[in-house]
Structure formats: C-alpha cells, structure tokens
Image: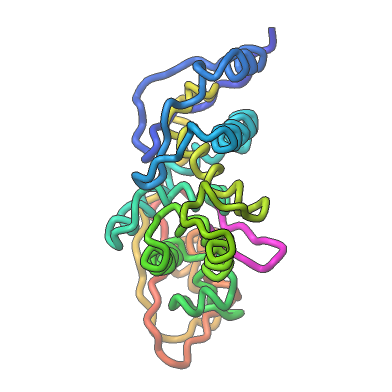
C-alpha cells in the first residue's frame, strides 16, 4: 500500500496541536471520505455565528461537494494549512480590531490561498482587490507602490468593505457573498427573488459556491486529521521577525538600500511585495514603513 507523505496538523487559528499524527494512505483517505457522512460530514456548521441550514437538501449537497473537493486537493490544501500558521497571526488581530468576525480569515484563504495571487481580471494580493475598489478603500495603487500586496493594509481595506456590506445586508454571510458577487449584484438578486438569506438565493455558479468553499476550508483547517491531513508541527511556515524602517523620501535604488540594511534585493522584495519598482518615488514625503528581516536569510 502506498503511503502519502506525512504532513502537518494545525488548529484553525494557527495554534499548533503540539502532537504528531501519522500520515494515512490515499486509499484510507478515500475510504474515510466515502464510507458515510457520519465519518466526515459535520453535524452543524456556521459562518460568523450564522448557522447553515443543513436540513435543506441542496445546502447539504453543496457543502458536501466542497468538503470532498478540498479534502482531496492534497498538496494545495496542505500548503494552505502551512501558510496559515504564518499569515493568520497577522490577519486575526486586524479583524478583531475592526469588529469583523474571525471566520473571515477563511475568505482570504479561498480568495488567494494566502499568497499574493494575480487574477486574470486584474485582482491582486491575498484579498484580491481590483484597482478601483482598492483605491476606494484607501489603498495606494500605482506602478511604484501597490498596497494590495501589503497584507496589513489590504486586510484593513477588506474590513472596511465587509463592515459596509454587513450594514447593508444585516448578515455576515451575505457580506461574504457580496465580496464575490458585489453589493449591487447581491442586492439585485434579493430584489428579484424576494428572499433575504444567502442559502435561499439562486446565484451565479461562482457566488453560489463561494460561502460553501469558505465553510469547507474552515472545517478542514480546524480539524485537518479528520479529513486526512496529518502534520508535523515543525513543518509549518513560521513568521520571520522583522524590524520596520520608516522612510519619508525617495529611494533611487532599492538594491543599494537593501544592501545598506544587510540584506539583498530579493529578500527586500519578499518582505515588501508592495514595492513594485526598483525604486521608491516619493515626492509628497509620504511615510512608508519597510520591513527588514532579522533572520531567515
């Protein structure tokens, strides 16, 4: 019997379990996920405290679909679990600061896999903002600086969007759906169909799956061993300590700046992906904070 490589087990909020669970084979995983819903299907699920009505047949089947798909995307889901240990500790306190439920960190998971992704439509970053929306939410977006790639600032912008959506719809679940379908799009469907619950709306394929993908990743990342992911805690990606260097003037050569800080250009860009050029043009004397790693290079 072929045995899968041993992966790592982590709780939903990135806190290590501190224990080692041995890997299971692909055959055993398939058996676990198909022997019966009692083996893997949750008795209840919620998003931000709003319960999904699993007694409705199509709701149950849609969640089942996303659980099965993501539990069988072995490498992709394992990488997300590893990255979460590094990214969630940055996102979580910002969500808490704005009063946005912690479950929205899983929205970032399905948007980007917790990397600075680039979509074919032009959305970028962990939170996948389009340029105009990013600017509306207070981010700088140009050829020199693109704060969609700045995890803290883009998380804050996402919080501002989600708070506005919650105020509009009165539901965190609909707020999440609107992140994909747009506030106007969700409003139009509500007006047409005369229902106000996400689970009762007929939506586009992508938006119809959107919240279920969030729920599935939440379940899998909270209980990875249940879904066939086993884990060495030492294999999780860890946060690298950094110092912040404040600058309020132009930097004509970021390579030279990096060397002066004791690192190279590659490491500078890894820790500051929002710097989009080889220089930082700053005629307005805006204050930027550049992160310089203290180890890991």
Is 103 included in the stretch rendered in magenta? no
Q: Is residue 255 left or right of residue 261?
A: right
Residue 64 found in image quarter:
top right
For the N terminus, give its image quadrant.
top right
The residue sitting at 61% across, 57% down in the picture is: 117
Q: Is residue 255 visible?
A: no
Residue lying furthest bottom: 283
Examine the residues drawn in magenta and state their main secondary structure: loop
Residue lying furthest front: 194
Residue 77 found in image quarter:
top right
Q: Is residue 248 left or right of residue 71?
A: left
The answer to whether 139 is drawn above or below residue 211 in the figure is below
The residue sitting at 50% across, 67% down in the picture is: 259
The answer to whether 133 is drawn above or below residue 21 in the figure is below
The residue sitting at 46% across, 26% down in the picture is: 42
Q: How many marks?
A: 0
Q: Is residue 248 visible?
A: yes
Residue situated in front as seen by the camera: 101 or 295? 101
Residue lying furthest top: 1
Q: Position of residue 51 (x, y in %)?
A: 39, 40
Q: Position of residue 225 (x, y in %)?
A: 48, 22
The answer to whether 55 is drawn above or below residue 283 in the figure is above
Q: Position of residue 282 (x, y in %)?
A: 47, 87
Q: Position of residue 101 (x, y in %)?
A: 34, 52
Is 117 included in the stretch rendered in magenta? yes
The residue sitting at 57% across, 49% down in the picture is: 210
Q: What colour scheme was applied to this rendering of the protein? A: rainbow
Q: Is residue 211 left or right of residue 88?
A: right
Magenta-colored span:
115-128
């Amino acid at each position: 019997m072929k045995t899968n490589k041993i992966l790592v087990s982590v709780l939903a909020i990135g806190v290590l379990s501190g224990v080692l669970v041995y890997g299971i084979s692909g055959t055993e995983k398939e058996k676990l996920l198909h022997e019966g819903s009692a083996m893997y299907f949750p008795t209840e699920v919620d998003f931000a405290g709003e319960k999904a009505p699993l007694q409705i047949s199509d709701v149950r089947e849609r969640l089942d679909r996303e659980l099965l798909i993501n539990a069988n995307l072995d490498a992709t889901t394992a990488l997300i679990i590893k990255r979460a240990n590094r990214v969630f500790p940055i996102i979580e306190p910002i969500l808490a600061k704005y009063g946005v439920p912690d479950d929205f960190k899983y929205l970032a998971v399905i948007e980007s896999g917790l990397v600075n992704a680039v979509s074919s439509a032009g959305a970028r970053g962990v939170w996948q903002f389009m340029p105009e929306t990013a600017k509306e939410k207070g981010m700088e977006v140009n050829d020199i600086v693109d704060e969609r790639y700045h995890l803290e600032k883009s998380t804050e912008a996402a919080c501002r969007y989600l708070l506005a959506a919650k105020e509009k719809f009165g539901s965190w679940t609909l707020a999440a759906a609107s992140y994909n379908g747009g506030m106007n799009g969700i409003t139009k469907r509500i007006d047409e169909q005369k229902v106000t619950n996400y689970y009762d709306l007929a939506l586009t394929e992508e938006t119809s799956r959107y919240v279920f993908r969030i729920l599935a990743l939440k379940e899998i990342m909270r209980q990875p061993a249940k879904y066939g992911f086993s884990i060495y805690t030492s294999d999780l990606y860890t946060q690298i300590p950094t110092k912040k260097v404040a600058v309020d003037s132009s930097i004509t050569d970021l390579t030279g700046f990096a060397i002066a800080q004791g690192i190279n250009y590659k490491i500078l860009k890894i820790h500051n992906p929002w710097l989009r050029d080889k220089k930082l043009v700053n005629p307005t004397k805006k204050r930027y904070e550049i992160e310089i790693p203290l180890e890991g290079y």
